[in-house]
Image: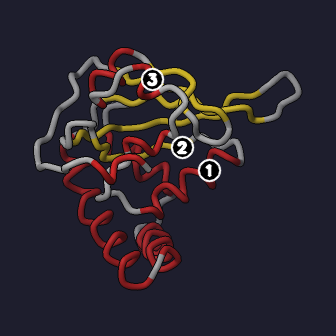
Amino acid sequence: MKNNQININNNEIKMQENDFIVSKTNAKGIITYCNEIFMHMSDYSENELLGQNHNIIRHPDMPKAAFKLAWDFISSGKEFFAYVKNLRKDGSYYWVFANITADYDSSGKIIGYTSVRRKPNDQAIKTIIPIYSKMLELEKSSGLKASVSYLLKFLEDNNVQYNDLILSLQGDL
């Protein structure tokens, strides 16, 4: 991951209401397409993004368990929704409401993924931050498995499936 060379700051950049960030990757997560809004929000040029792993924008405040869950969903062909804190090249960050779907070839094999991100609901971010913080804390103290277990227990305790929780937090769909 390239972002370990970035001086992270606490400056948040907000998406506009009608912005849609779009990117495509191959099956391994390597960026093959990025739209102008993605370039603008990430502060990277097209040449800097194409051919890079999508985790080039991964913010260290994001628990690894969230990405494990994402890969579990999308690699099995399931649609995935999430709130993601992304790291810009300049060290700032931005939150997105993400939707990731698989792309298939004519024989039904997954050949890549398309991600569309838009401005998240502010209240949803306030709700998700403590969950992610606890997951991150558990990852540091007890590992990835403990973080995943915490999230699964949270979902069970609230009698909700992961995507349903995320969609209900967004609220305007």
**Residue mark closest to the camera, 2 vs 3:** 3
* Residue drawn 45% across the image and 58% down it: 66
Residue 78 position within the rendered picture, expressed as x and y whole percent measured from the top left: 65, 43
User: Do callouts 3 and 1 mark residues in contact (Cβ within 8 Å)?
Assistant: no
What's the CA distance linking mark 3 and mark 1? 19 Å
- Upstream in the sequence, badge 3 or badge 1? 3
- The outermost residue toward the front is 5
- Label 3: which secondary element: strand
* Residue drawn 31% across the image and 32% down it: 172
The residue to which callout 2 is attached is 80
Q: Closer to the camera, 151 or 67? A: 67
In the visual, does 49 lie left or right of 119?
A: right
- Upstream in the sequence, badge 2 or badge 1? 1
Q: Amino acid at mark 3?
A: Val
User: Do callouts 2 and 1 mark residues in contact (Cβ within 8 Å)?
Assistant: yes
* Residue drawn 18% across the image and 41% down it: 92
User: Do callouts 2 and 3 mark residues in contact (Cβ within 8 Å)?
Assistant: no
| Mark 2 closeness class: few <14, some 14–19, many ≥20 residues within 10 Å | many
| Mark 1 closeness class: few <14, some 14–19, many ≥20 residues within 10 Å | some
- Upstream in the sequence, badge 2 or badge 3? 3
- Quarter holding residue 142: bottom left
Q: Amino acid at mark 1?
A: Phe
In the visual, does 28 lie left or right of 109?
A: left
Q: Is residue 141 above or below residue 3?
A: below
The residue to which callout 1 is attached is 73
Q: Amino acid at mark 2?
A: Phe
What's the CA distance linking mark 2 and mark 1? 6 Å
- Quarter holding residue 51: top right
* Residue drawn 52% across the image and 40% down it: 53
Residue 7 position within the rendered picture, expressed as x and y whole percent measured from the top left: 19, 49
Q: What numbered label is drawn on residue 22?
A: 3
